[in-house]
Image (cartoon, rainbow, N blue to C red):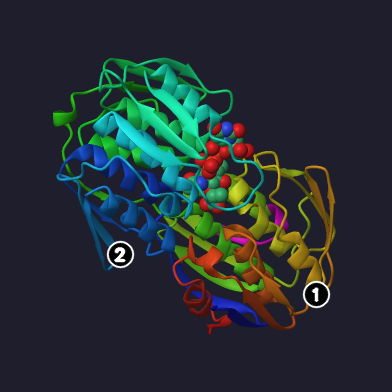
Amino acid sequence: MQRLIIEGGKRLSGEIELQGCKNSALPIMAAALLCRGRCVLRHCPEITDIYSASRILNCLGAECSFSDGTAAADTAAADGTEIPDALMREMRSSIVFMGAILGRCGECRVSIPGGCELGARPIDMHLSALRRMGTIINEDGGSIYCRIPSGRARGARLTLPFPSVGATENIILCAVCAEGTTIINNAAREPEICDLCGFLRSCGAEISGDGCGRITVEGVPPEKLHGCTYTIMPDRIAGATYLCMVAAAGGEMILKNACTAEMEPFLSVLEQTGCSMCCTGETVYLRSGARLRAVQDRIRTMPHPGFPTDAQAVLMAALTTAEGTSVFEETIFDCRYRHTEALRKMGAEIDIVGRAAVVRGVGRLHGAEVSATDLRGGAAMVIAGLSAEGTTIITDISHIDRGYEKIEEAAARLGGRVRRE
Ligand code: EPZ
C-alpha cells in the first residue's frame, strides 16, 4: 500500500496551475453517453475517479482513452445498460450514469454507488424524480432496475426538497432527450452543474437557468445530439486545498488558471484568517505571514453559493494553528468530521458538538502517522503535515488519489517535502 511521507515545518513558496475539476468531469463523462459521437474533453484531471468513469463507459460499449490531460470518448456503439456492482462501488458519481443510460436506452440496471463515507448518502431524490419522468424503478437486494415503458422519458415539473448536486445532474441527463420540457425547481447551483450544462449545450441540448436554482430542459430528439470538444473548468476545491497548504505552513504562492469567481465563497472566508490575497483574472496571489487568525464568524457549510462543504476539512487543517478559536458547522453531510481524529493526533484541539466543530488554535502541530479517511479529509492531513514540526506519514492515500493529481508533486511545486513510497 502506498503512503506519503511529509517533512513539515518549512515555509512554502511556489506556483501551481489548477487541475481540471473532478466533480465536473465525472458527470460530463456520463453525459457523453447521450451524444452518440466523439467527445473530446480537454483539461480532464488524471485521477482515479476519472479512470473509474472511463471503465464504466468502456463497459457500456463506448471507447474511452486518455492522453496528456485530454479524454476522448466515442459513444457511437455504446449499447450497454448495466453497470457491474464493483464499478458502481468505486465512486459516488457512478450513480449519475443512471440518468445518462436512461436518457440513451430507456432502461438500466445499477446499484448503490460508493464514494467517500460521509454519513448516509441516500439517492431517494434521484429515484423520486426519475419516477416522475416516467421511469419504473424496482429495487431488489441492492440492485436498481429502471425501465421507461415508452422508451423515452417524459418532461416533468420537479421541485427538489434539497438542492442535491447528484440528483440535479441525474435529472438533467434524463431530461435532455425526454419528450417535452423538464423544470427543476430548487436545483443545485454548483459551478459544476453549469459546466455540465455548458458541455450539453455544446452537444446540442437545450438547457437554461443553470446556476440560478431553476433549470429548464427542453427535451430534444436523441439524434439531435452530437459530439463536441469541451474544456473542463478548473477544480475550485483543489485550488482551496493548495491555498490552505501555504496558509497553514506560511509563505506565498501563485495559483494559476483558478476560477476565482467560483472560488469566492471560499476565498472570502480564507481572507478572514489574515492571509493577504489578490485575485487578478484567473490568478490568485496569496501570502501568509507568521500565524493565521481564527475566523470570527461560524463557518457554516451550505449549498453553493454558500461555503463549500468540500473545503471544510482543508480549511480546518489550516485553522488548527491559528490564534483564537474557529467554529465550523457541517450542514450538508451528517458525518464529515472523521479527519479530526488524525488532526488531534497531530496536536490539534478540536471538539465536536453535534454538527459543530470547535477548533482552538494551538502553537504548532507535530508529525504523526495517520490514515486518510476520505478524499478531503486526506488532503487536510497533507496540509497539517506540511505545517507540522517533524515527519508525518499518511496511509490509505488511495482516497486522496481519487481527487488530486499527484498531490505530492503539487506540494513539491510549492517547496513542500512530500514523497510517495
Ligand atoms: C456532490 O456529492 C459532490 N460529489 C460532493 O463532493 C459534494 O460534497 C456534494 O455534491 C455537495 O456539494 C460529486 O460531485 C462527485 P448531494 P452528492 O446529492 O451529489 C443528501 C468531494 O469531496 N441527499 O448534493 O452526493 C445527501 O445525503 C465530494 O469531491 C439525500 O438525502 O451530494 C447529503 O447529505 C464529497 N437524498 C446532501 O443531500 C438524495 O437523493 C447533499 O448531497 C441525494 C442527496
Q: Is residue 36 above or below residue 40?
A: above
Give the spatial CA distance, label 2 vs label 1: 38 Å
The nearer-to-camera label among 2 and 1 is 2
* Amino acid on which disc 2 is placed: Gly
Out of 68 and 413, give the one closest to the viewer. 68
Which of the four quarters of the rendered structure image does ligand 1 lie in?
top right
| The quarter of the displayed image where residue 195 is located | top left
The quarter of the picture where the N terminus appears is bottom right
Q: Is residue 25 above or below residue 79?
A: below
Please give the name of the residue rendered at 70% of the width and 73% of the height, measured from the top-left corner.
370
Q: Which residue is mark 1?
A: 364
Kindly state the secondary structure of the residue where label 1 is placed.
loop
Please give the name of the residue rendered at 53% of the width and 28% of the height, measured from the top-left corner.
125
Q: What segment is highlighted magenta in the picture?
A: 272-278
> Any magenta on residue 138?
no
| The quarter of the displayed image where residue 147 is located | top left
Q: Is residue 297 left or right of residue 421?
A: right
Q: Which residue is mark 2?
A: 69
